[in-house]
Image: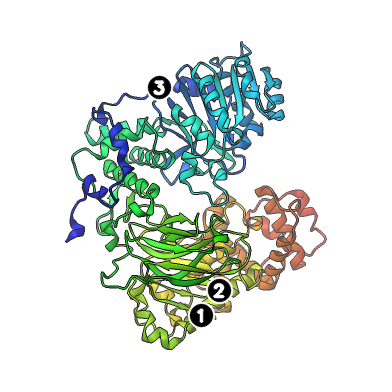
Amino acid sequence: MLFQMKFAPAVIALCLAPAPLFAVNALAPSTSPVSAPATANFDTDRAALLQGVSELPATGVPGGVCAFGPQAFAVVAGKEGKKAELPVVAAARWEKGRVVALGHNGYLSFFDSGAGTLLVNAARWAAGDATASTKPKIGVVGNASLLAHLKGAGLEAEALDGKNWNTRLPNVRVVCIDAHKIQPDDIEKLARFVRGGGGLVTAATGWGWLYGGKDKTLLATEFAGNKLLVPAGLAFTAGTPEKSTRTGYTTGGDLTLLNASAALNAIVNHSAKKVILSPEQLAQAGATLADALRALPPTDTLLLPRLAALAATPGAADFPRPDHPLLADNAIARLIVTQELEAYRTAKPEQIRANPVADVFPGAVPKNAPRLPNRVVVIDTSVPAWHSTGLYAAPGELIKVQVPAELADKGLAVRIGCHSDSLFHLEKWQRAPEISRRDPIKTPASTAANPFGGLIYIEVPDKLTAAKVNVAISGGVESPRFVLGETKLLEWKMRLRMAPAPWAELETKKVILSVPSEKIRQLDDPEALLKFWDQILDAEADLATIPHERKRPERIVPDVQISAGYMHSGYPIMTPLDKSVEHSLSLVEMKQGSWGHFHELGHNHQVGDWTFDGTVEVTCNLFSLYCMETLCGKPPGQGHDAMKPEAVEKRLRGYLSSTDKFNRWKSDPFLALIMYHQLRVGFGWETYKKVFAEYRDLSKEQRPKTDEEKHDQWLVRFSKAAGKNLGPFFDAWGIPTSTTARESINSLPAWMPADWPKS
């Protein structure tokens, strides 16, 4: 069979039309990547930057900074998946000068705790002197608070303001500037300044620069901050490394493999059995290189030529598929796949060719299936996000799209593929880590393609002027699509459900189910099924106290592999490609309940103001309990084995006999859910709705800012809504609250559940 063969890099390259996508090969060194020079050891530099900094607090949502050059290094890192990290602060030596880059421009005005210390250290280190004994002159561009902070730390600093600030560079040793403020004519002047021995401290929020629908590839090629830093071996990325502490990022650990050049050296040596990496090291090296491939412009000459040379070496690489996954220990194969996917991402639609594994997943399109010319679909631009079209793009085939001229370059895009989960961080790939592609609609006539194929969508940005417009699509294959209130049952039974595309959609104004077409070929009555799904969405809205009419429908998509958990929330909600798909398509089974679907929809209705640490996987289950009770006729609190009376009693007694109650409570979602269910039994769902509505109406100033404030507000607001003092109840459960909060409800009668264990 075709899909039992291995694909050498040369074969993989055939998935792209002949084009200069791999022109970087011409720049590849004649020596093997194994012989590439090793990166330097920057422990002393990193120690100087982190002197007195044990933790870097997060400001906003920091973005990533890629360290890929041999003279670059990670300084502070956040989590990437379960076993890897990515930098949020990185630095580099650049010829005679030095650079420090932070992953959020807010850090240049954020001086709390370690952040302020890091900025002072960065200015000193960038000046070429990490000690406090000298006072290099620091120039600060357009940031009075940073200027005052540096002066307060004893540094000699001056403002570089005005349009011609870059003409004063010879007067300073270091420049501090928000990278978002760098203009095109600043780039070369700053580069010469640093290469000649100057220092640069800068910051940018990569994902923030992309806000508004910019294509991710533009961050590498168009953002002035990256145009400046890439030659130094640094780049701001679109990623958002997760916090490693509750409030920010730890500053310890060995971050050597967070440099992409070092990671590549390690993988090559591991493959040659010169050095054996642990599974954790392989995961880290792979994450670092995957991040670098997505962050670098095609013109990079530091790392990409080495990667291209590696891809061209003799040997075979497996492209992953469900029956032949690609594991983390096959590091070079994963690297080649990642590089190929990056080539797809940056290729023009006309250059794309089908990837052979697409026939395995998402699925093959019959060769004789008609490619429809000029199919017109009506798009309501008042509804944001993905709009289904009832069309499917065969792998590698060109799709042509025509929109009204007034909508060109307004943020619309063509998306091919509903499987949008990225799997790069996982130890096992059962499919290519990215198989969905988005092409912006910049002109009235545009094109799109995807080497893996997929359902065709028109993406609409938020807050676009409302209108119903005709969009013409050519080249797509018809897919089974049933729209509640529009599609006739007879047409569905006689023709639509047998449409040739491998994926189908069942759609209402509240929810859209994307499923393999083979699962709906025998579905006779999608209308009754979808009406019940609408009831589910309405029930979740009722508990959340939001209108039944939605801004956009929720989406649920099954995949052969998803990025996290058994299912996960988001847009779309992702589920496994298993029996849960058949369950979601059976009215009989759905009426018996579907905890997983209710749970993930609950996440999408969850509100952070009443969800504190330890309850993210708890308060979403209030929606599961509500649907189970009000729609499926389950007794209150039922619907999951963990909530059966005998299981509840066993869990509760074990908890009450334990020490360190609150930490145990936070670590066991079904234990915590018992507490929330007791409130439902005591005061009913209407009290929950009253409290949720109260939270929804709070002003920004009234909303809780910390977990401690969330504990207090939940206690006080629920107590007042219930007319009872819940302080003793919270104490019995070990939930910490403040004296002020408890005293504020002392006038109410105390309450405990009638069935609370007496011993």
Counting residues from the N terminus, which is met first, the one under dot 2 or under dot 3? 3
Circle 3 sits on which residue?
Answer: 41
Which residue is drawn at the image coordinates 56% and 71% (left, top)? 625
Looking at the image, which residue sits at the far bottom?
490
Snapshot quadrant of residue 409: bottom right
C-alpha gap between disc 1 and disc 2: 8 Å
Q: Vertical placement of 750 versus 220: above or below?
A: below
What residue type is disc 2 on? Lys
Q: Nearer the viewer, mark 3 or mark 1?
A: 1
**In the picture provided, is 74 more to the left or to the right than 181?**
left
Counting residues from the N terminus, which is met first, the one under dot 3 or under dot 1? 3
Q: Residues within 10 Å of mark 2 (few under 14, many from 20)?
A: some
C-alpha gap between disc 3 and disc 1: 62 Å
**In the picture provided, is 55 more to the left or to the right than 257?**
right
Tag shown at residue 185: none
Q: Secondary structure at mark 2?
A: loop
Q: Position of residue 57 (x, y in %)?
A: 60, 37
Tag shown at residue 509: 2
Circle 1 sits on which residue?
Answer: 484
